[in-house]
Image: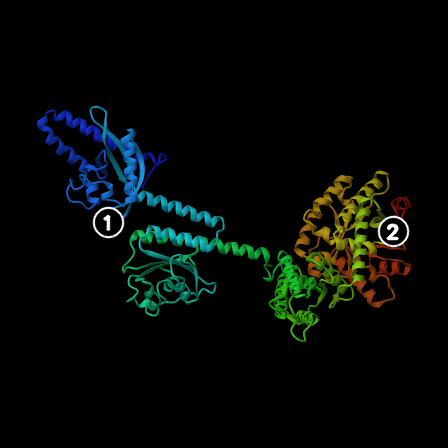
């Protein structure tokens, strides 16, 4: 077989050209040194001697492609005796007919056309049975009349180069397979076939170590009997477990040159000897960090040890196999993380659609139903705030594990995020069991006492339930309706389960309509501000106002804040509404100053959502810059519960606001659960006593005691105190006597618009 390759490397072609040029120079020089016919014999001896020293094949053939002259290299490789032993023979006498036919046709074409064939790659099998690649050039030889009388051939053994090229191409192909995510069995099979092609008379096998680190799992063995592979599947590795099990156990190569006598195979030779194998050489496959992942083995039908070249190839094979396994494990890990919750290990939101679709298909097949329950833990935030996020995470893991114990393998528990879960009940019930029974078991499991960090407490859940096909035909409908039912369970007092009803759908529809109305109100400027004055008790001067948002609905008239602020907080509209309030309040205060009124502070409430936004401080700065209002004339009111959600983050944000020059106050003080230690860290200037502690003053002794305590605490921390909800003269007298600094309430003024407030500001001290 021969192939003309014009793209071969220049080194071989140049070497061939140099060799031919050298031969021509030698022949020319010999003709000059031996001009007489009498010296012809001696010249021939010299030429033959020189040609025989060349390690490449050199030969001359006649017009019938029969050898006339051949050098020692050809004679030796064909196991012939004497340089004339090939004389008169053709390739048909040396090589198989197909190979000889290829040589013959090429040479006859050269003789017929007179055109040389250069740098051809030819594959032959020598007399020892070894395959060889030759880089061959064949040139026509002419007589004095220019007639082609034969050809001269030069061939170089390039077998090692071809083997190296084949190996490199094979490696590149394998790495490409790994990069493209080919299945492990395909990568392993290609790797084994590559090694088998370079090591004669061996059969390869790749075994993997199971996740338990103890048992064998078949990887690939394309030329090994499947029955034998099945026999070793699941075997446990150990110090005397044949070649592969021992190599994985030791973490080092195990070379067994005679299976029949080696003690490592004592218990297993009966399994392998019937297949004709007599030796087995195994090397562990390891990860980049050195963890054993499996083994690569070569079985030989001949006793003995592998060559150094063989072990070098095995080393390459184990390295590539290790890369393939680690890549697959990394992909599996990424896939798992993409579809499972990192904290609880439960399927996550991305898996919910798939699980529900599968459950619906199963329900359709059996003519049954499936149930989806939406779960939200009650008061989970309290655990986070009081014990920290670590305790909250631990609670979620405990709850997830408890829920899993209450359902069957056909059911699913999905964590949506935070403290929200979905339970998917699929498949037929056991005799006497109902869906309610299983969901009740889930609720009871969640409500069992929990002990974390030495503290015992109990959490409950609110559960909303929707069923297919009654309440929805797909995951979107079912989840939305279970969510509606869950919120109804929250509304009726938590720790409850509610099944979706048409009435809930109507309520949800109304809620959605109100949400859109509120969104439209913001866009169409239906919102406006009113202002309630705040007075200094010692001077009687109006020194500040609180900006209060109102909604003038085109059909329902004036809507109280209590009717739309909770909706805004729930839907996320509180963010843009709060930003609008801040900007409008700053602009109005600047307008009062420009009109010549006494400078006052405008106080604006901050929602928890606003305060937690990363760019909140920048948005405050932008509102001040846009309005032109100096920061010292703006106060932001923060609630205790808002600050305590993440104290460290809250303190950092408050310090950034303080650097702007903005005043900070804690609103509704006394209704939260901030500690004195925390309060000392807050850079605030005022505490605001909640109206719930003011409304029954001075008659209620408990409220009076609380008010005095708050005032005393605030003054000890160098803070001013303002009481809101003041409506009577008796309340003012009590607060003044208790040391309260400021008041706000109906006694002074109801919330009024900007023009009415302007009139009040023109009045001297009240």
Disc 1 residue crowd, few under 14, some 14–19, many 20+, Cα 10 Å: few
Q: Position of residue 232 (x, y in %)?
A: 40, 65
Q: Write down the quadrant of residue 449 in the picture.
A: bottom right
Which residue is outermost to the left? 38
Q: Is residue 523 visible?
A: yes
- For the image, the number of numbered tags is 2
- Viewer-nearest of labels 1 and 2? 1
Residue at 87% across, 51% down: 751
Give left or right: position of 623 versus 539.
left
Q: Is residue 29 above or below residue 253?
A: above
Q: Viewer-proximal residue, 129 or 242?
A: 129
Residue at 27% across, 59% down: 304
Residue 223's tag is none
- Closer to the chain start, of discs 1 and 2, is 1
Residue at 45% across, 64% down: 213
Q: CA distance from mark 1 to mark 2?
A: 109 Å
Q: Write down the quadrant of residue 428 in the picture.
A: bottom right
Q: Which residue is mark 2?
A: 751
Q: Which residue is mark 1?
A: 128
Disc 2 residue crowd, few under 14, some 14–19, many 20+, Cα 10 Å: many
Give left or right: position of 271 versus 446.
left
Q: Is residue 260 above or below residue 192?
A: below
Q: Position of residue 660 (x, y in %)?
A: 71, 45
Residue at 20% across, 40% down: 89
Give left or right: position of 296 versus 142.
right
Q: Is residue 531 visible?
A: no
Could you say whether the residue bearing mark 1 is in a helix, strand or loop? loop
Task: Locate the N terminus and report the quarter of the image it occupies.
Answer: top left
């Amino acid at each position: 077989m021969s192939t003309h390759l014009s793209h071969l490397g220049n080194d071989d072609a140049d070497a061939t050209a140099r060799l031919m040029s050298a031969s021509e120079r030698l022949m020319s020089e010999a003709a000059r040194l031996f001009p007489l016919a009498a010296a012809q014999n001696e010249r021939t001896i010299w030429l033959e001697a020189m040609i025989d020293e060349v390690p490449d094949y050199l030969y001359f053939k006649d017009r019938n492609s029969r050898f006339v002259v051949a050098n020692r290299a050809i004679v030796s490789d064909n196991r012939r005796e004497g340089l004339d032993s090939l004389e008169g023979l053709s390739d048909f006498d040396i090589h198989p007919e197909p190979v000889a036919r290829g040589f013959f046709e090429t040479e006859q074409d050269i003789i017929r056309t007179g055109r040389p064939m250069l740098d051809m790659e030819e594959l032959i099998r020598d007399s020892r049975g070894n395959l060889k690649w030759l880089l061959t050039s064949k040139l026509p030889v002419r007589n004095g009349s220019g007639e082609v009388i034969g050809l001269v051939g030069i061939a170089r053994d390039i077998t090692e180069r071809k083997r190296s090229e084949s190996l490199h191409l094979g490696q590149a192909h394998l790495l490409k397979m790994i990069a493209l995510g080919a299945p492990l069995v395909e990568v392993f099979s290609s790797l084994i076939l590559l090694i088998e092609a370079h090591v004669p008379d061996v059969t390869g096998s790749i075994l993997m170590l199971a996740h338990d680190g103890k048992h064998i799992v078949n990887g690939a063995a394309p030329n090994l009997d499947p029955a034998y592979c099945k026999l070793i599947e699941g075997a446990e590795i150990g110090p005397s477990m044949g070649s592969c099990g021992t190599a994985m156990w030791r973490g080092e190569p195990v070379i067994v040159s005679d299976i029949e006598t080696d003690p490592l195979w004592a218990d297993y030779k009966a399994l392998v000897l019937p297949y004709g194998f007599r030796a087995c050489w195994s090397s562990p496959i390891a990860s980049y960090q050195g963890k054993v992942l499996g083994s690569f083995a070569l079985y030989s039908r001949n006793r003995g040890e592998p060559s150094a070249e063989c072990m070098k190839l095995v080393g390459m094979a184990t390295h590539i196999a290790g890369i393939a396994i680690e890549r697959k494990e990394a992909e599996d890990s990424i896939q798992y993380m993409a579809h499972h919750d990192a904290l609880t290990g439960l399927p996550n939101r991305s898996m919910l659609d798939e699980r529900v679709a599968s459950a619906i298909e199963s329900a359709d097949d059996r003519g049954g139903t499936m149930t989806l329950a939406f779960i939200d833990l009650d008061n989970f935030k309290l655990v986070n705030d009081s014990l920290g996020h670590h305790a909250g995470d631990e609670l979620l893991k405990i709850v997830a594990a408890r829920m899993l114990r209450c359902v069957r393998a056909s059911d699913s528990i999905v964590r949506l995020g935070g403290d929200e879960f979905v339970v998917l009940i699929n498949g037929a019930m056991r005799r006497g069991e109902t869906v309610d029974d299983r969901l009740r078991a889930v609720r009871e499991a969640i409500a069992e006492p929990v002990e974390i960090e030495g503290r015992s407490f109990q959490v409950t859940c609110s559960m909303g339930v929707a069923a297919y096909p009654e309440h929805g035909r797909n995951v979107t409908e079912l989840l939305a309706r279970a969510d509606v039912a869950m919120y109804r369970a929250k509304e009726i007092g938590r720790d409850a389960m509610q099944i979706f009803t048409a009435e809930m759908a109507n309520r949800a529809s109304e809620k959605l309509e109100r949400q859109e109305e509120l969104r439209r109100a913001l866009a169409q400027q239906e919102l406006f501000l009113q202002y309630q004055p705040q007075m200094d008790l010692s001077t009687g001067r109006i020194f500040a106002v609180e900006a209060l948002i109102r909604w003038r609905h085109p059909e329902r008239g004036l809507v109280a804040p209590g009717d739309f602020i909770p909706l805004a907080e729930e839907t996320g509209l509180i963010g843009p509404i709060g930003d609008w309030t801040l900007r409008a309040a700053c602009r109005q205060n600047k307008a009062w100053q420009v009109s010549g009124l006494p400078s006052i502070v405008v106080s604006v409430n901050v929602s928890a959502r606003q305060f937690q936004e990363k760019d909140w401080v920048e948005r405050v700065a932008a509102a001040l810059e846009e309005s032109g209002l100096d920061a010292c004339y703006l106060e932001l009111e923060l609630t205790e519960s808002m600050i305590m959600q993440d104290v460290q983050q809250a303190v950092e944000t408050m310090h950034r606001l303080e650097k702007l020059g903005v005043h900070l106050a804690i609103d509704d003080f006394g209704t939260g659960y901030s500690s004195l230690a925390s309060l000392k860290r807050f850079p605030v200037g005022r505490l605001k006593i909640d109206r719930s502690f003011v409304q029954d003053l001075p008659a209620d002794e408990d409220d009076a005691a609380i008010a005095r305590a708050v005032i005393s605490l605030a003054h000890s921390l160098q803070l001013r105190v303002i009481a809101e909800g003041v409506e009577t003269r008796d309340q003012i007298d009590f607060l003044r006597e208790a040391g309260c600094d400021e008041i706000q309430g109906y006694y002074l003024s109801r919330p009024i618009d900007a023009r009415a407030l302007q009139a009040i500001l023109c009045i001297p001290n009240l």
